[in-house]
Image (spheres, helix red, strand yellow):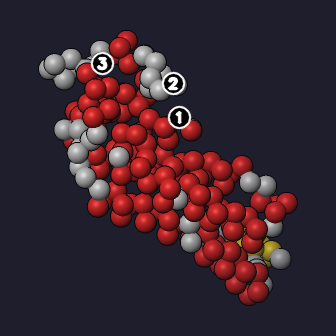
Amino acid sequence: MTSAQTSRSGAPLTVERRSPARRRRLQRVELIQLLAIIPILVIVDLVQASSQLQWFDYWSALARFMGPEGSLRPLDLFFYSEGHVPAIPGLIAWLNVQLTGGLAHALGYYDVAVVIAQLLLLRSLLPRERLGALTFSLLVVAFAVLLFAPQGAWNFSRAASGTGWLTANL
């Protein structure tokens, strides 16, 4: 239901009025989607509690494309390792060294942000109208639980690993 009103300038405004039952249902559905925050917070806590030290593979990869004075050798970012060419993760690792001295927490938080982007991408691909609001919201929560599952904790606590593999998923 809509009603016409005018603004101070006299331009017409359209105001949509929802029934109280519809407003409650929308709020409940939105609250269900907020449950997706719980697994994200669990992983953020895991990152905070993890070591700041990187594992050996991080440092050996840096030696391939970083000069002794810390400069980037861009063409050396393109090498084959463990089934892919880690140019983007390598650039992110180099930036991590420049900005944080190579600490793992920064990469762990980057990994969380990448997986949140994946969650939002999956959410945008769901057919909301066909599924209905409740099913849509429950699937968003299920995606969050799967993406931030404890079985993938290595990607976040040993952040260089996640930077390589999780970035590839985008």
| Circle 3/circle 1 CB separation < 8 Å | no
Q: Count neighbours of disc 1 (C-alpha within 10 A) and say few if under 14, some if 14 to 19, many if 20 or more.
A: some
Task: Looking at the image, tell me whether mark 3 or mark 1 is earlier in sequence order.
Answer: 3
Residue drawn at 35 percent across, 46 percent down: 158
CA distance separating discs 1 and 2: 9 Å
**Residue 48: where, in percent of width, then height?**
30, 59
| Circle 1/circle 2 CB separation < 8 Å | yes
**Residue 63: where, in percent of width, then height?**
25, 21
**Residue 13: where, in percent of width, then height?**
71, 68
Residue 29 seen by the camera = yes
The numbered disc on residue 64 is: 3
SS label for mark 3? helix
For the residue marked with disc 2, what is the amino acid? His
Residue drawn at 29 percent across, 56 percent down: 50
Task: Looking at the image, tell me whether mark 3 or mark 2 is earlier in sequence order.
Answer: 3
The vertical placement of 114 against 80, above or below, is below
SS label for mark 2? loop
SS label for mark 1? helix
Residue 95 seen by the camera = no
Identify the residue position indicated by label 2 in the image: 84
Q: Quadrant of the C terminus?
A: top right
> To which quarter of the image does residue 22 belong?
bottom right
Residue drawn at 69 percent across, 67 percent down: 137
Q: Mark 1 or 2, which is nearer the eye?
A: 2
For the residue marked with disc 1, what is the amino acid? Ala
